[in-house]
Image (spheres, grey):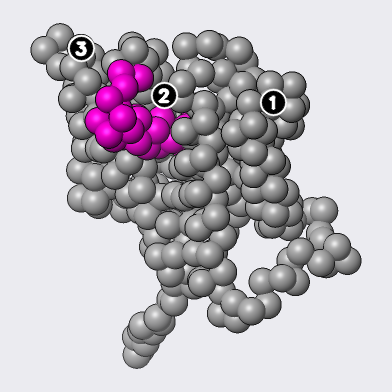
Amino acid sequence: MIDIYYNVFHKVPWDYWIPVYFYFTGLSAGSFVLSSLFTVFGLKQFKSLAFTAGISAVILLLFAPIFLVLDLGQPFRFWKVLVPWYFNPYSVVSWGSWLLTIYPIALLIYCWYMFKENEKMIKIFGISTLPLAIGVHGYTGFVFGLIQARVYWYSAVMPGYFLTSAVLSGIGLVIIITLIKDKLLGGSTLSELFTPLKRMMIVIIMLDLFWIFCWKITLLSGTDEARASALISLNDPLYIFGVLLFGMLIPFFLLIYPKTRNSVRWLVVSSVLVLIGVFLMRYTFVFTGFEIPLS
């Protein structure tokens, strides 16, 4: 008997533009959620952050679709997903394309009324834009979570995991921007909001760790392919050290350790680590999913 082996090359259809796109949409959504704490939920202590976070959300979202279009094999055909008669109500991607169109429009109007200090219209557009912000990044979790062929992605926790990590990255970004703003303009906004921002980061990191635990346990108790994909990620130094250790566990430790938990400097360090960790989460998540071939 002659044994015949086939070495089939499995091409990865996505480039690094895709995790960058996910990262920017998450930063935008997370920044807007922080802005809405005052404009929608009426938490007055966050008033000084509302406009900064809103503008950050706009700028980030202007770049996000560019990365998505750059990854297309024929980028000049992107407009076809926005033609109404091509809309597929059963496709998460179709819904996401329209969310990416409507959300920035609503966000720009929201920021315009914040600039004009029109409280009534800020409230109206804040309430109407919030579900769009959640949807524009939550749909990416559904895109992955509904792909049965890719066992690493196929999980019900994906929408929640993507949303909470997006909010975490948005908080981290706004903290850094606020620090720069305070240094340049001589303000004390970050010091005044130190405690609530720190507590939010702690809670969300804990929630992210919970999502990860549920996800990995499900994979490890699943099919051979699911277990293999989980083991690939758990043996990936970029995931273990970049995402879990430097991106989550070290910031969490810095935020609760008695000698560092009351320092603005360490809050900023934690924010930088969180931003790096969330990006590496997007990166490793996308490409680990392609490690297990479909055939």
Horizontal side of 243 relative to 223 (left or right) equals: left
Q: Give amino acid for label 2.
A: Ile
- Residue under circle 2? 204
Question: Marks 1 and 3, Cα distance to the nearest angstrom?
Answer: 36 Å
- For image coordinates 37% across by 15% down, the residue present is 193
Where is residue 212? Give x, y as percent: 40, 34
Q: Residues within 10 Å of mark 2 (few under 14, many from 20)?
A: some
Q: Which residues are magenta?
A: 162-189
Horizontal side of 33 relative to 186 (left or right) equals: right
- Residue under circle 1? 118
Along the line of sight, the residue nearer the viewer: 54 or 141:
54
Quarter-wise, where is residue 15 in the image?
bottom left
Marks 3 and 2 in Cβ contact (< 8 Å): no
Tag 1, which secondary structure? loop
Where is residue 291? Give x, y as percent: 39, 62
Quarter-wise, where is residue 33 in the image?
top right
Residue farthest to the bottom, as pictured: 2
Labels 1 and 3: the sequence-earlier one: 1
Dominant SS in magenta:
helix
Name the mark nearer the viewer: 2 or 1.
1
Name the mark nearer the viewer: 1 or 3.
1
